[in-house]
Amino acid sequence: MRLKSYIKYLLRFLLLQFILSYLTIFYFNNFLISNKGLKQNIYENLLQDGNRFIPFVNTEFITVDGFLIFAVFIFLMILYSTKFYTYVNELSFSINKNLLDEYFQLYLLWTSYLFTIFFIFRFENVSRGYLLIYSFLIPIILLIFRNTEFISSILGRSVTSETFVTFNLDETSNFRNLRLITFRQNIGSFSIRNFDNPDNLIKRIDKINKDRKINLIIINLDNKSSIHEKIEKYLISTNKKILLISKKELSFKNNFIYRKEVIDERYLVYFNNDVQYGAKYILKRIMDIGLASIGITLLLPISLLVIFLILLMDGYPFFIKQKRVGLHGNHFNMYKFRTMRKDSHELRDSLSNLNKGKGPLFKIEDDPRIIKQLKFIREYSLDEIPQFINVLRGEMSIVGPRPLFDDDTKLFNTSYMRRLNVLPGITGLLQINERNTDDFSIWYKYDIEYIENWSLYLDLKIILKTPLAIFSKKIKGL
């Protein structure tokens, strides 16, 4: 685990070095100096200092751009040597819900370094106005790269839109001022008296999650030193953030990765089993945005043809919005090209006797609601094209379990609630293996398999297999 952390820090360091160096050189050449003669003066000053202090260095290696790259490198080395920048402690107290404090710390550190360097190495005749703007610009980039949650919020998953529930945690507790909690919204505070009966807690969490999304679960265990093994397994497998608070040091029956700290004479155990969170979520969102943009562009002619056919066969509207359940139980409107008669979803109850689907699925052979001339649109999944818009909005991913209706979600059992802990997708393991199945247990199998084995590499394999699965019945899945 330590090696993975070092690799992550190294990659972030190299990316920051590249971005800051490129930006600094570009800004310096285009804004800070007004002509090449001024840059030549700075170059001559650097040569004089080089001959005086480092005569063993060949003057061919001394350039203004090279010095700027080196200056950025030294600053990042100083910054990375501080715990302030490299480590964001979510289990620290925070009463400030904005990032201004962190920004001004970075601003003061950067400006003091920048102006010292420019003074010592005689960077003369630079534009003072543009220099002031530059001093504000770099700390913004540093702040973005300091915490993956900041980048996640830009890509559609803001920490301030996340929620938490508490169990047995007093409303006046000082632990509510933890950074982990203050940035998130409280959707419920509950009391559980008997932890020896695990079903009470598990059913309560599941019930809340079916009505409202939950990102963080906080449990105050008071004097307990352990929790029921069933609760322990459940919390580990929920794929959510978990914070346990106790007066005694906690011991566990399962092996898993967690952080432990002692604050105000209480033992805090925190673990984050959110599958798509932080850097993983960022990479997935970048891939989704790129592929969705390409998909919308390439499929635009087909979309226009589909729209024309729908309007010709059954009139307006040519698309529908269906309320579906997404990541962590969040509700959203999923877009589809309309291939059924108007208000077809309201006919579900009257056609329930024809339902061949098992479990929550609603499947009818030769569904009478489908417009016959538009069956091919459903057969080749062309009705799903508008969901690229849902992907751009951050409500769906290219790959993931298919989003279901809220009524279907109410029927999920405890283990299957895990499917809500990844972004729902346009395609997935089910679609490239048994896309036309009406057996919900098969959906369950592929959804859980995807969650437990999720990676960007798996997403790419599914994406490449999907066109073949749509146009060929001989395709073999993963």
Image (cartoon, rainbow, N blue to C red):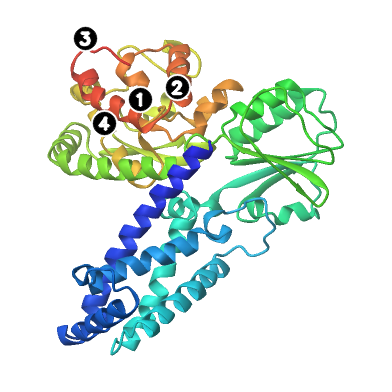
Marks 4, 2: nearer the viewer: 2
Report x, y in % for residue 400.
Answer: 39, 30
Circle number at residue 428: 1
Is residue 278 visible in the rendered image? The answer is: no
In terms of image quadrants, where is residue 473? top left
| Three-letter amino acid code of the residue under disc 1 | Gly
Closest to the observer: 474 or 262?
262
Q: Residue at x 46, y 48 (%)?
A: 157
**Mark 3 element type:** loop
**Mark 3 Cα within 10 Å, few/some/many (few <14, many 20+)?**
few
Which badge, 1 or 2, is on the more N-terminal residue?
1
Kindly identify the residue that appears in the image at 39 percent across and 48 percent down.
Answer: 11
Q: CA distance from mark 2 to mark 3?
A: 22 Å
Asked if residue 269 lies left or right of residue 292, the reply is: right
- Disc 3 and disc 4: Cα gap in Å? 22 Å
Label for residue 474? 3
Q: Please state which of residues 401 and 463 is positioned toward the viewer in this rendering.
A: 463
State the mark number for residue 383: 4
Lower position in the chain sequence, tag 1 or tag 4:
4
Could you tell which of marks 3 and 4 lies nearer the N-terminus? 4
What amino acid is at disc 4?
A: Asp
Residue 186: in sight, yes or no?
A: yes
